[in-house]
Image (cartoon, rainbow, N blue to C red):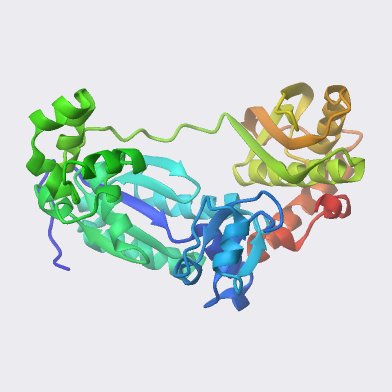
Amino acid sequence: MEFKMDIVGERVILHVDMDAFFVAVERRANPSLVGKPVIVGGHPEGRGVVCSASYEARAFGAHSAMPMARAQRLCPHAVFVPVGTSDYGAAAEEVRRLWRALTPCVETMSLDEAYLDLTGTQRLHGPVMAVADRLIRRTWGELKLPCSIGIAENKMLAKVASDTAKPWGLLRVMAGGGERFLAPLPLRQLPGIGPKTAERLTRYGVETIGDIVALGPERLAAAMGEAGEQLWRRARGEDASPLRRDEPARSVGRETTFETDTTDPVRLDATLSWLSERVASALRRERLAARTIALKLRYSDFETLTRSATLAEPTNDDRVIYREAVRRLRLAHTRRVRIRLLGITASNLCDAQWQLDLFDAESQFKRLRLNQAFDAIRGRYGAGIIRRARSLART
């Protein structure tokens, strides 16, 4: 592609989207999965859904949010990996460090995608196409995670560009070229057009995004009201939505829905241990500690309770978090009803710097070193490679 220095003041937005992110993280931890159809999600026999499907599995019709049982029927020879085998949050933070090295103007949309505003950074980083190419290469070379990037003058066009470039691609829509770029694309590729809207538009003979523009704002407004005129503007590539910079984390939480509702105390205890490990590890990655620990409990009839406790000292130690979560569960679980979901959230965050207890400094220091060792092993080999023994009875 042609490199072009940006005009001063021209808005430059990157949409970075990790390719089959959960699958990529699992493949990094287990290279034997490379080249095979892989599906990450819940158990096929339960009510779980697909969280991520490799492109080999997508060729058979499997995709995210699909019931796992259906994905298994479509692609029975796939390798099914339970979600949570690796720490996707840790992998996402590795990627975010690369993003933040380019610009502080990052709007994270999920674990695996974000918008980066590179407006005015050309003197610092060079031509934007070269910057994006380096980012793709670094993400793979340093982290072994593939990504695709779209570049445009606004967020909507950048997202469509990255979707079009997948997998492992780079596409730029030059300023003023949005309408021409969008015109031949199918309706569903325009963000905001769902199945019902697409079905409604096809009644007017609309099959592509360009057909929306040809229909005109008046006819769309008559058919759909104000939303019709907005749709027409978006089909022309217009989008004025601002990029909202990420704010510091206010809480760190993890939760899990059981494949089958349960009251088994061993399984509940193991789940709290596993969640505590994940929350504590996430806190330590951000060099944070929490003063408040909250338990979320959802019964099989969907009644949901939250119970919290504020600690005397902030913590990012999973044993402390686990202990408090167990206490909250004993107080909250008062019904003879099966439990559908458990979650743990750490809030009231502060920097992970506090004075050691004079009479317990040695044991505190040992726990700190042990946690650091755990984090290093998990960071290299995946979150599931090492767990506390009480976490193993979770499944």
Say left or right for 385 vs 48.
right
Q: Residue at x 84, y 41 (%)?
A: 268
Pinpoint residue 361: horizontal percent, then vertical percent: 86, 39
Pinpoint residue 203: horizontal percent, then vertical percent: 21, 42
Query: Camera-side residue: 202 or 112?
Result: 202
Q: Is residue 362 above or below residue 344?
A: below
Q: Can residue 357 be seen from the camera position used here?
A: no
Pinpoint residue 44: horizontal percent, then vertical percent: 67, 58
Q: Is residue 373 above or below residue 323?
A: below
* Quarter residue 317 falls in: top right
Query: Camera-side residue: 274 or 260?
Result: 260
Q: Is residue 358 above or below residue 143?
A: above
Q: Residue at x 21, y 57 (%)?
A: 172
Q: Residue at x 70, y 28 (%)?
A: 302
Q: Is residue 306 above or below residue 391?
A: above
Query: Camera-side residue: 6 or 2?
Result: 2
Picture quarter with the N terminus: bottom left
* Quarter residue 232 falls in: top left
Q: Can residue 153 be seen from the camera position used here?
A: yes
Say left or right for 47 vs 140.
right
Q: Residue at x 43, y 42 (%)?
A: 108
Pinpoint residue 385: horizontal percent, then vertical percent: 74, 63
